[in-house]
Image (cartoon, grey):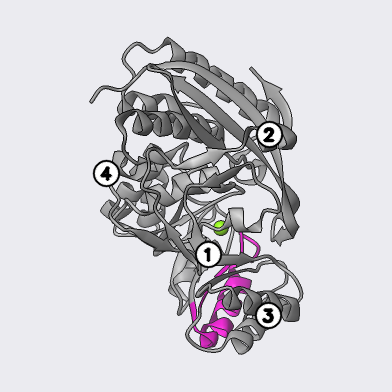
Amino acid sequence: MSWPRVESVEIFCVQLPYREAFTIATGTSTASWNLVVKVVVEGGVEGWGEGSPSYTVLGETRGSVVASARRLAELLAAERELSPERLYELCSQSPSPSAAAAVEEAVLDAWARSAGVSVAKLLGGPYREAVETDVTIGIMEPEEQAKRALKFVEMGFRVLKLKLGLDPEKDVERVKAVRDAVGEGIRIRVDANQGWSVEQAVSVINRIARFDVEYVEQPVRWDDLQGLARVRRESPLPIAVDESVKKPADVFKVARAEAADIVNIKVMKSGGLLGALRVAHASEAAGLANMVGCMGEGRLGITGAVCFAASALNVKYVDLDSDVLLAEDYAEGGSAIEKGARKVPEGPGLGVKVDASKLTKLAAVKRA
Ligand SMILES: [Mg+2]
């Protein structure tokens, strides 16, 4: 098959409100500000992609994201022989990984549609027909977190991810309250989003281990690999890193420091689906397992991440639920979710339908 040239790129910015305020150790948000990209490739086939920027993790601002997407659009339009490898090269050089992820997803969607296959197939999969995702509960009072946990279990979720990291004493109470509420048989993992000191992390983890916690994500600062290694040595639970790994090379820094057991890959951190595959391959080579997480993507961005998660052998855990937390979205179809199981769309492309009137309604600014 050939790789159709990119003929045009359109960029939209949208504001997607959450059902309720979402608090983690680094802050509270009430909406997700996302970038939506439409490309048209040779033959008139269109593709769509979504980016969900992060100032806290990636240092991205709205201005830098839009400027990066426009620059990448110019570079792609000028390419005579665009291939997946060249697309990866251009995306990996973008100053904004989430802008690159949005543009790249749109191109892959259009290429897959042109070939009449799914994006998962384009990525070398699908290796799995569906993935089981957790659902995330933001930081709130322990009894409130327990109530949310019960509600999600009633909806059919079998895996819960609790946000911790604001108050070590209460964090122990949170995990206890949720385990008491849901009983045995439901998997619980926790994410401190860098909120603990090394001493706090060791203390909390040793106290929550008796509530059957699957693993602990990013207990301490992203750049404190020696601290992470100490937490891991003194912890009875597996340790996952998220903020510490963005690019493939970061995996080896973590592995050399013996700082983690699991690497959380996010398409937004790795600048696209092809970059995410590279992080999975690096993790496999370094002997670390992968989970796949998300920022604030809606159905469109999440569907791309599901296609990746279903296609990479090394992925053992999935945290792809941000669209569940949204009150409004402009996209439908793609990867449907039922009782925590996310189906891999059969295509063509991502199988996502963008509702133009909803996109306009949610659009903050439109740029050509
Ligand atoms: Mg995380």
Q: Earlier in the sequence, mark 4 or mark 3?
A: 4
Mark-to-mark CA distance, 4 and 2: 34 Å
Badge 4 crowding class, 10 Å Cα cut-off, few under 14, some 14 to 19, many 20 or more, is: some
Residue at image coords 74%, 52%: 29
Residue 10, magenta (yes or no): no
CB of residue at label 1: within 8 Å of ligand 1? Answer: yes
Q: Which residue is mark 4?
A: 124
Rendering coords of residue 237 (x, y %): 46, 76
Mark number, residue 146: 3
Res 95 seen here = no
Percent position of residue 42, x then y: 38, 16
Q: Earlier in the sequence, mark 4 or mark 2?
A: 4
- Of the numbered discs 4 and 1, the one sitting upstream in the chain is 4
Q: Amino acid at mark 1?
A: Glu
The residue indicated by pointer 1 is 217
State the residue at coordinates (61%, 37%): 355
* Residue 141 coordinates in the image, percent (x, y): 76, 75
- The residue tagged 2 is 357
